[in-house]
Image: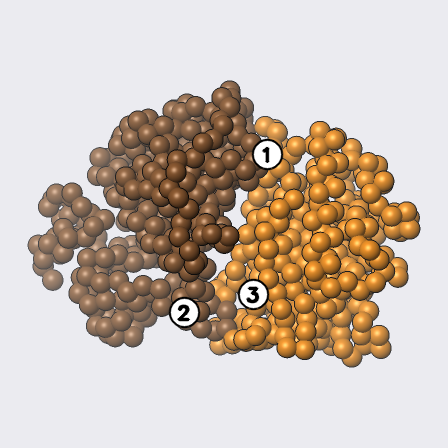
Amino acid sequence: MSESAVVDVLAAVPLLEGWQPPELADLARVLRRRSVKAGELLWPQGGEGREMAFVVEGSVAASLRVSGDRDVEIATVGAGEMVGEIALLDGGPHTMAVHAAESATLLMLGRADFAALLASQSPLAFRLRRRLAALLTARHREQLRLLAASLDGEPPAAAPPAVELEPSGAPDSRYLRRMASFHAFDPLALWGFLTSGRYVRCGAGQTLLAEGVPSEACYLTVNGAVEKLLVRGSRRIRVGLAGPGKPFGYESLIDGGASPVTAVTRERSLLLVIERAAFDTLFAGEDAVSRVILDVIQADLVATLRQTLRPQARLSASL
Amino acid sequence: MCRILAYLGEPLPLRHLLYDPDNSLVTQSYSPRMMNTFLNLAGFGMKAWTPAALRPQEPLSYRATTLPSFDRNLRSLSSQLAPTCLVAHVRGVTYSDEAVVAETNLHPFQFPGCGIVLAHNGHLRGFAGMRYALVEHVRPDLAQRIEGTTDSEWIYALVLSQLEDPFAMPLADELAEATPAALRILRRVRHAAGIETSSPVNLCISTGRSLVATRFSFDYGWYPPEDEMLETDLPFVSLWSTTGGEYARRDDGWQMTAGDPPRSLIIASEPLTVDDAGWLEVPEYSMLTAELTSAGVEFETRDLDV
């Protein structure tokens, strides 16, 4: 496979949308071509995340083992799509076993090279982070759609929530710096992020986001807990809990869609509210402060995708 | 700062839970995967109900402040016993001269004459300031049975006090009513004492046939700025479960076999295997109830609204 052929393949990969041919050619040089036969295992569930794969031809299937010694096929990944990036993003094991659904040609990207791409402060790296956020958001929405389909009934009427938010001063910086979500950041960049919005207090049981209504802000829980719910009639599935250091409400701001969940404070909470305009500036920016919000959102999406995978697999197994 | 484990189902060799898997409860005492800085070296305790016992409705008790990994007696017992129900606990304490490492502080707690046992993973912040306010909510005949210095033993007495007869053998539904009632009292007492710091209360309560487990924290996510627990608290109060036919070794490790309806249930602070496929994380603010019946294990997860 010539370098130009690889570049042509990469140009069609959604993750690399907008990359110029010289940039794709640079990437092509660190990729390893791999051919697999139908049924061949790329990596096992729980295996160390050493590589991710772009599918050139054919397809691979991702499956999850659930209790009862059963394997549930979660997705088939075809030409132009990628698989295995979650383990490279968070350093954890591969979420699913992946094997070739048919004979396939793949381009493998190693952990170190992927990390180097993301670690760069270049405009290309920021573009890659934004594309990753968009693609992971789309995948998250699909997971939620499948879970919601398991509940009978219609989603609640799409009415903007009326919530009482009491303005608050900024929390103690010693507390914020010690939060696990913020350990990795430069103090000045973190300060820039944490002063990009306003702080509010909110009692328990307040609806901050309504499923089906676009969010007008990205929230970050400083203290307390916010439940992310799918509600259908009297039934509800809790799909996440945003505790200290966890963002929520960003999906609408990334892709313009409606909020995929209803968000309700489970405890009295102190929140950082980053309004849409400020979020857009941070998300589109290419400096250290933008890096903070991109990293915080990416970490949350990756954790959420991992967490939601098991209920999704159980659901698939029961169908 | 502890790890808990509960089992309900068909007779299962104890060593399959305590020693054999690569993240067994004993392994979690010195190498927990989901705790950042704490080890659980302050002792081991268990209550095990075995059909072969002379009085199978009463659990075998074992508590020792020695490290379970070096405890030959425990290892020997675990090779001989096959309980249908187990509640086990490895205790961790903060590294300070205020911690009391003693057999009377080891979980699971079981007062004389009472068929209910309780183990706790978590801690009530500011407990010294609320202990005596709890006295009025605990039956005197139970309060006088408290021997140790832990918040957990008071929680046990408080849960028992919410039952119509704490010396009877309640079903899971009765335990599932008493447990939130006890937590509501704790919430009121905390509020009155001005305690507003995150305090996890993951409980395993059992009679040998009925089991209730909670994943819950008061004031979730609230810490004072200088709090030493900030970075470790939320991740370590995890709770996981797996259900199926039987917990058995397969080519690729320990896992539940298929079983519909399920015949076995394991609840643990963290999965007993490094490969956690087959385990489900119990959500925060949840209560899991289970009952051992002739058809298997009936269980459900409920929202815990306290």
Say yes or no: labels 1 and 2 on the same chain. no
Q: Are marks 1 and 3 in contact (CB under 8 Å)?
A: no
Q: Quadrant of residue A65?
A: bottom left
Q: Chain of mark 1?
A: B
The C terminus of chain B lies in quadrant = top right
Colour brown maps to chain: A
Residue type marked 2:
Leu
Image side of residue B228 versus residue B71, left or right? left
Give the CA distance from mark 1 to mark 3.
30 Å
Q: Secondary structure at mark 3?
A: strand
Give the residue drawn at x 79%, y 68%: B59
Image side of residue B28 versus residue B104, left or right? left
Disc number placed over residue B242 in the picture, else none: 3
Q: Position of residue B264 (x, y in %)?
A: 61, 71
Disc number placed over residue A319 in the picture, else none: 2
Pointer 2: residues within 10 angstroms few (<14), some, or many (20+)? few
Which of pointers 1 and 2 indicates the residue nearer the eye?
2
Q: Position of residue A222 (x, y in %)?
A: 51, 32
Q: Chain of mark 2?
A: A
Q: Quadrant of residue A209?
A: top left
Disc number placed over residue B222 in the picture, else none: 1
Say yes or no: labels 2 and 3 on the same chain. no
Give the residue drawn at x 49%, y 28%: A164
Colour orange maps to chain: B
